[in-house]
Image: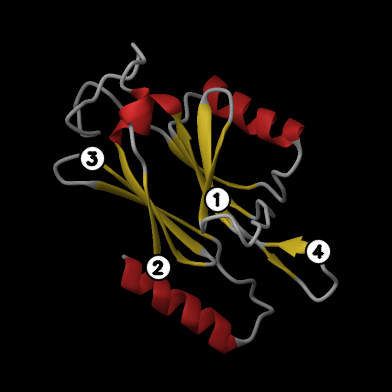
Amino acid sequence: MTKFNYSTKALDNCSFMRLKKGLSRPSQSYKVATLNCRTLRSVSSQAELDKLMKDYSISVTCIQEHRYVHTDSDPEIVSRKLRSTTLFTASAVRNDCGASIRGVGITINSKLLPLLLSVEKMDERIIVATFKGNPKIVIIACYSPHNCLPDDVVTDFYSKLGNVV
């Protein structure tokens, strides 16, 4: 399990990013979405995701199948700044033919970054974001195995997911 602690020290000077006590405010609502994007490797795919989140006022999007393969020198959680959001990814893997497959991530609106405590990779298929609050807000992004995979792979995934929850 790898933990990415997000520091807001560099963001403190931004006027729109004032630290708040937590997400739980009765006057404000947040939209959480999920997207099997099939790939986010192209700049146009990233721009489209960013635009959709902005147009539909989505605060957090759980991403499946982004197909980014991190290099050996990269940390297990990599962050990429898009225009109005930040994308956090856990590495995809390569199949027998060398093509990249899978990969989970979470995209967070920049206005929520001061509330982000951590992003953790629990498994190659499970990533967890924790936000400030009382109680803390936890969002789990996962990519479940296909039904054509062996039963032990599916059972193992749901066992790990149950431990996270």
Q: Kindly identify which residue carries mark 3.
A: 132
Q: CA distance from mark 4 to mark 1?
A: 18 Å
Q: Are marks 3 and 2 in contact (CB under 8 Å)?
A: no
> First in sequence: mark 3 or mark 2?
2
Residue count near mark 4 (Cα–Cα under 10 Å), binned few <14, some 14–19, many ≥20:
few
Q: Are marks 3 and 4 in contact (CB under 8 Å)?
A: no
Q: Are marks 4 and 1 in contact (CB under 8 Å)?
A: no
**Amino acid type, callout 2:** Met
Q: How many marks?
A: 4
The disc at residue 89 is 1
The quarter of the rendered structure image containing the N terminus is bottom left
Q: For mark 3, give the secondary structure.
A: loop
Left or right of 151? Residue 2 is: left
Q: CA distance from mark 3 to mark 4?
A: 38 Å
Q: For mark 1, give the secondary structure.
A: strand
Residue count near mark 3 (Cα–Cα under 10 Å), binned few <14, some 14–19, many ≥20:
many
Q: For mark 2, give the secondary structure.
A: loop
The disc at residue 99 is 4
Q: Position of residue 132 (x, y in %)?
A: 23, 40
Q: Kindly identify which residue carries mark 2.
A: 1
Q: Residue furthest left?
A: 134
> First in sequence: mark 3 or mark 4?
4
